[in-house]
């Protein structure tokens, strides 16, 4: 986790877990409400109870399928995000190494220019104008 992004992910996870917990509690409340209504109301027949049970199971299966689909999407995005972070880290490492190499070469260049100037002064030679300009 780089920078302050890790805390945001944790908050997102906590919010998601809270949403799941609320959905679970609401589903349980609906189930108990249906169960209480069935046991209190004598007009519900066994067929009505069976139909409600089938509808509830069908809704539950649909919710599980949707949950699995979202989990698969999350896993795919998470994998892609991890791959991009790895590539970014490699690029930063390469850039840092290149910057260090450039700095080293610039220092060497300055040193070599000083040596050339020193040699010119020691030699008292005349160089062609073209070489002296470089």
Image: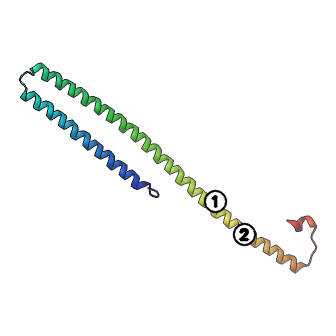
4 displayed left or right of 61 = right
Q: Is residue 24 above or below residue 129?
A: above
Query: CA–CA distance between discs 1 and 2?
Result: 15 Å
Q: Which of marks 1 and 2 is nearer the N terminus?
A: 1
Where is mark 1, residue-wise?
A: 98
Disc number at residue 29? none
Q: How is the image coloured?
A: rainbow
Image point 75% across, 68% down: which residue? Answer: 109
How many neighbours does mark 1 have within 10 angstroms: few (below 14), some (14-19), or many (20 or more)?
A: few
Where is mark 2, residue-wise?
A: 108
Residue 128: percent from left, percent from top? 93, 67
Are dots 1 and 2 in contact, CB under 8 Å? no
Where on the picture, by quarter, is residue 4? bottom left
Badge 2 element: helix
Where on the picture, by quarter, is residue 52? top left
Where on the picture, by quarter, is residue 64? top left
How many neighbours does mark 2 have within 10 angstroms: few (below 14), some (14-19), or many (20 or more)?
A: few
Image point 6% across, 29% down: which residue? Answer: 40
Q: Nearer the viewer, residue 62 or 115?
A: 62
Quadrant of the snapshot with the C terminus: bottom right
76 displayed left or right of 50 = right
Badge 1 element: helix
How many labels sit on residues?
Answer: 2
Image point 39% across, 41% down: which residue? Answer: 75
Image point 56% across, 57% down: which residue? Answer: 93
Residue 66: percent from left, percent from top? 33, 32
Residue 18: percent from left, percent from top? 28, 46
Residue 1: percent from left, percent from top? 44, 55
Residue that protrudes farthest toward the bottom in the picture:
122
Q: In this view, does 51 lie above or below 83?
A: above
């Amino acid at each position: 986790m780089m920078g302050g992004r890790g805390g945001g992910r944790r908050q997102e996870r906590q919010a998601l877990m809270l949403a799941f917990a609320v959905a679970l509690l609401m589903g349980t409340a609906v189930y108990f409400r249906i169960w209480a209504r069935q046991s209190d109301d004598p007009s519900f027949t066994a067929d009505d109870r069976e139909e409600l049970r089938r509808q509830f199971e069908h809704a539950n299966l649909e919710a599980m399928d949707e949950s699995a689909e979202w989990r698969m999407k999350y896993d795919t995005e998470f994998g892609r995000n991890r791959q991009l972070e790895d590539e970014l880290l490699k690029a930063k490492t390469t850039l840092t190494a290149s910057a260090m190499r450039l700095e080293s070469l610039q220092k060497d260049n300055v040193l070599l220019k000083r040596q050339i100037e020193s040699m010119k002064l020691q030699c008292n030679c005349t160089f062609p104008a073209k070489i002296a300009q470089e």
